[in-house]
Image: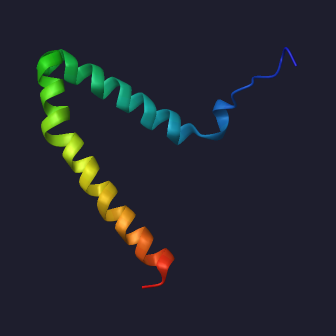
Amino acid sequence: MSGQNRIPFDRHPLAMLLGSFAVVGVLAAIVVLGPGGVFHLLVSFLLPIAVILLVVVGTIGLMVQGGC
């Protein structure tokens, strides 16, 4: 088992690519906006959008599951 890789990276190359874009994007945002600007963007924009999406998707999921 010493020669076998425990995490098979070759199975999901698109996930690796998107993950690397996310990491590079976050680092670039910190460099461009500064830590305070990134925190402000996160709290004022991304967090409310995530909550709204969670509520909408959750409501649709409950409606589908309930058969309405």
Give the quadrant of the N terminus: top right
Q: Quadrant of the C terminus?
A: bottom left
In this rendering, the answer to whether 54 lies above or below 65 is above
Instruction: Give the image's coloring scheme.
Output: rainbow
Which residue appears at 64% of the width and 31% of the height?
A: 9
Residue at 75% across, 23% down: 5
Would you say 64 lies left or right of 55 here? right
Residue 17, placed above or below residue 6: below
Q: Residue furthest front?
A: 66
- Classify residue 38 by image quadrant: top left
Q: Tell me residue 62's x, y (percent).
A: 43, 71
Near-viewer residue (52 or 21) = 52
Position of 12 compared to 34: left or right? right
Question: Looking at the rendering, which quadrant does residue 61 occupy?
Answer: bottom left
The location of residue 31, given as percent across then percent down, is 19, 15
- Horizontally, residue 3 falls left or right of residue 44, namely right
Furthest residue toward right: 1
Q: How many marks?
A: 0
Looking at the picture, how far across and down is residue 25, in whole percent? 29, 28
In this picture, is 25 found above or below 36?
Answer: below
- Name the residue at 17% across, 16% down: 35
Residue found at x 29% / y 25%:
26
Q: Is residue 15 above or below residue 50?
A: above
